[in-house]
Image: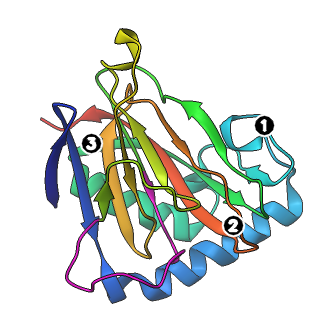
Amino acid sequence: MFSKSLFGVDFLSKNFGDSHQELNKRLIQDIDTEMSINKSLERSFAKNNCSWQSVENLNKRYDSFYELGEIIKEHSGYNKIDVWANVILKPGGFSRPHTHGPHLNLTGVYYPHDLYDDYDDNEDVVIDGWNKDEGVLVLFDPNSMSRGFNKVQTIKPRESLLVLFPCYVPHMVSPMISNKRRYCISFKLNNKKK
């Protein structure tokens, strides 16, 4: 795992690279299946007509999500996980700013496909200040918002990238402007292993 302090908070990431290609294909196939049978929930990704968000606990419904959940638990040191999927379907899709709960738990995202083609193969995670690219994960400094200004860091989606951060960190996804589909898998972790 790669560890970096942003805003005085620890962020963890791991790029699984080519070893997850087959899993990523199955994850996308299962997301597409879920989209075809269930309409979007009215949550952070679905506050617009260009995005879709699943129910939680897809790791209890699909083998691919179960496998991913076990991998995330192993690398995070937690033993309980709830997993769901988010898809931006067309230009204008985004996720509004939100958090995932109490201070003691972790949350994060996993990307089953690339949104960009401009990665250095040796980079684990691309973290920038304010990046104006479409579909980036925008992380807000949880302390600066209360002081009236917003410090942000952005992370560019790349296939097989896992990102972990505290549930209380506000985050969003910047709007898409192209016709690319943006797939991501979100999760909440609790019950840290001893």
- Coordinates of residue 21 in the picture (x, y in percent): 45, 87
- Coordinates of residue 93 in the picture (x, y in percent): 74, 53
Q: Nearer the viewer, residue 30 or 163?
A: 163
Residue of label 3 = 78
Sequence order check, earlier mark of 3 and 2:
2
Q: Nearer the viewer, mark 3 or mark 2?
A: 2
Sequence order check, earlier mark of 1 and 3:
1
Residue of label 2 = 31
Q: Which residues are magenta?
A: 109-125
Q: Nearer the viewer, mark 1 or mark 3?
A: 1
Q: Amino acid at mark 2?
A: Ile
Q: Nearer the viewer, residue 153 or 38?
A: 153
Distance from the alpha carbon under mark 3 to that under mark 2: 24 Å
The reply to whether dot 1 and dot 3 touch (C-beta < 8 Å) is: no
Question: Where is 23 relative to 68, above or below?
Answer: below
Q: Amino acid at mark 3?
A: Tyr
